[in-house]
Amino acid sequence: MTTKAKKKYQVVIQQEACKGCALCVTYCKPQILISSPALNEMGYHYAEPKKQEKCTGCMSCVLVCPDLAIEVYCE
């Protein structure tokens, strides 16, 4: 019997395109996204992944991002 390998996902956020609305942070069920304490060039607290290994690949963050600044990749 073979066991299924768990898929790993990587969340990539274009920091300079993020305006810090935090919708992705709110809608992330596994709670891997946070608002960064750092600022981007426009002066916004951009979103960033905190615990990549917990990402389920649900793509909720991608769907709610009004700036199209988030991509999720399967490794």
Image (cartoon, grey):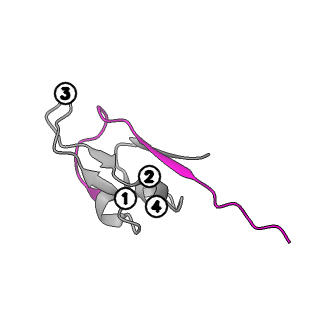
- Residues at discs 4 and 1 in contact (Cβ within 8 Å): yes
Q: Quadrant of the C terminus?
A: top right
**In the image, farthest residue toward the left:** 43
Helix, strand or loop status at disc 4: helix
Residue sitting at x 16%, y 36%: 39
Mark 1: which amino acid? Answer: Ile
Disc 3 to disc 4, C-alpha distance: 29 Å
**Circle 4 sits on which residue?**
54
Q: Are marks 1 and 2 in contact (CB under 8 Å)?
A: yes
SS at badge 3: loop
Q: Percent from the top left, x then y, of residue 43? A: 13, 34
Q: Would residue 13 be counted in the magenta stretch? A: yes
Q: Amino acid at mark 3?
A: Glu
Which residue is denoted by mark 1 in the rendering?
32
- Residue type, label 4: Lys
Residue 42 in picture, x, y percent from top left = 17, 31
Q: CA distance from mark 1 to mark 2?
A: 7 Å
Where residue 48 appears, x then y in whole percent? 32, 46
Comparing 21 with 11, the one in front is 11
Label 3 vs 4, first from the N-terminus: 3
* 71, above or below 8, in the image: above
Residue 67 on image: x %, y %: 35, 43
Tell me the magenta residue range.
1-23
**In what element is the residue under mark 1?**
loop
Q: Main secondary structure of the magenta part?
A: loop
Residue 24 is a magenta residue: no
Q: How far apart are the two marked residues, 2 and 4, measured between alpha carbons?
A: 5 Å
Q: Picture quarter containing residue 51?
A: bottom left
Residue tagged 3:
41
| Label 4, residues with CA under 10 Å away: few <14, some 14-19, many ≥20 | some
Q: Which residue is mark 2?
A: 52
Q: Earlier in the sequence, mark 1 or mark 2?
A: 1
